[in-house]
Amino acid sequence: MPLRIGGLASGMDIDSIVKDLMKAERIPLDRLKQEQQTLQWKQDEYRDINKSLYALRDEVFSLRLPSTFDAKTATSGNSSVAEVSANAAAVAGTYEISVSNLAKAAYKTSTVETAAYTTGATLEQQFGFGATAADKTLAFTINGTEFSFDATQDSVYTVVKTINEYKDATGNGLGVTASYDADLKRFFLMSDNTGAGQQIDVKDTVAVNGNTLMGFALHIDKSQIAVGEDAQFTLNGTALSKSSNQFTINAVTFNLKGISNQDAGGNPVPSTVMVSADTEAVFNSIKDFVELYNETMEDINTELQEKRYRDFPPLTESQKEGMSDKEIELWEEKAKSGLLQNDPILNKVVSDLRKGISDIVENIGGSYTNMTEIGITTGSWYELGKLHLDEGKLQKALNDDVQGVKDLFTNDSAVDNEQGIGIKLYDAIINATKRLIDKAGSQTGFTTVDNSYIGKKLSSLDDRIDKWEDRLLDVEDRYWKDFSRMEQAIQQMNAQSAWLAQQFNSGGA
């Protein structure tokens, strides 16, 4: 915007005059911007509703899956021997387990204390190999893999780090972890896994003055190969073994913790494991759904019933200039209110959700055909579809016939009135979110182009606003040119008047 100074000849406040004239010219532009702001607010509110529906969709998704209702729980009669858990595929029943041996890793440890380590000490300084510049290399193998070190440069912690960071050509590690405890003055080697298939075979291959690193310095016994052990246990009378203390059999996961006690005859005493339907998990899933459903319906109904203040349009920038922040906040609170009042899309969402909840599911074999029978009822008319949960009735329904509750939610059929509640609600929510995206777009979209109804309108308004702003610049420039010509004319008249006055004055003299 160029610097303009007017009124030097006329004495008029040209800047104020032009601003006042432009206020009238800006009225159509302000209306476009107000329309744009209203649409942006509506878009945000539609998208907020969609967020709530997405959360409800995720909750309902689990209720359309049979696995949710097939959840199992497992309890151990002696958790000091075995801890247990079960997934949906587990068969309900009783198991007996006794443990005679836990799975162990292969390990080797210094048989006596090593020489003390001081900070920064090399292998030579700690162990005194008598290394020279010509004779300083120490080497050993672990399970056939050789490691070589410089006694005058490397430390015991270099040895640890080299073993632990080893990778072969295919990127696999040694399968053995090394450590050194300076306080205990001992070196440790342990296989990464347990089981009889694990081993640690150590051999010194290069010594300095006859002194080896593993045998002489670290006191590792090389005479025998260390091997791991399998877990040994009896399950329902059958002797079994596993390389790990944690394993899964028939969808029941066992985590062995200790050896079973023995009876008077020296035989392991079995511990009982019970696997049963996890009705508590199903109960919590349904309860969480009811709570989130009510929250979502409340959000939507609040928008549908919110009062509309049509005398409070969005503020223009010039209007905001004369208001405090609090006044602007209170005004915009009313301007945003009721933008989705009686919105047909939201009314459709509410109708579909309420229908999905209240429909009877026909031709299913269980004890229940509708939500009321398992303790979920719709409140009074003024509660606008709010659900009420009778927790005792739901728990009884699950205890009496969990399969019937499962069928009520998950029955899959091409016939509409035979579809389970979970399937119907999920489809209703998917359709609702699609309609809202078509209307207002999505905040999570990967495209920068918003092809929704509101998105296209906002894009059109952007173009119209840009054209109006360009037009107003031309109008303002024209006003200034007009006033500039007036100023020039007045200036010429003033100059002529001054010349005439000078002529009259000189003639009279």
Image (spheres, grey):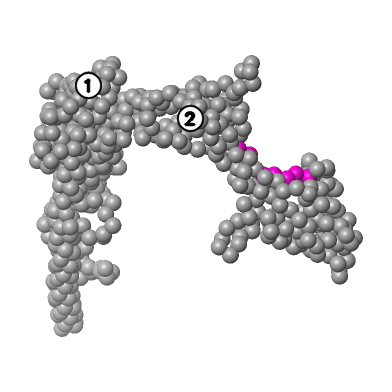
List the residue tagged with mark 1: 374
Q: Residue at x 16, y 78 (%)?
A: 492
Residue 52's place in the image compared with 92, above or below, is: below
Q: Is 77 left or right of 348, judged from the image as shown?
A: right
Q: Secondary structure at mark 1?
A: helix
Q: Residue at x 26, y 60 (%)?
A: 448
* Tag 1: amino acid: Ile
Q: Is residue 232 visible?
A: yes
Q: Residues within 10 Å of mark 2 (few under 14, many from 20)?
A: many
Q: Is 461 left or right of 84, judged from the image as shown?
A: left
Q: Quadrant of the C terminus?
A: bottom left
Cα distance between the residues tagged 2 and 1: 31 Å
Q: Residue at x 50, y 38 (%)?
A: 247
Residue 107 magenta-drawn? yes
List the residue tagged with mark 2: 84
Q: Quadrant of the N terminus?
A: bottom left
**For the residues carrying marks 2 and 1, which lies nearer the camera in this image?**
2
Q: Is 311 left or right of 99, judged from the image as shown?
A: left
Q: Is residue 83 visible?
A: no
Task: Magenta stretch: give its range.
Answer: 103-110
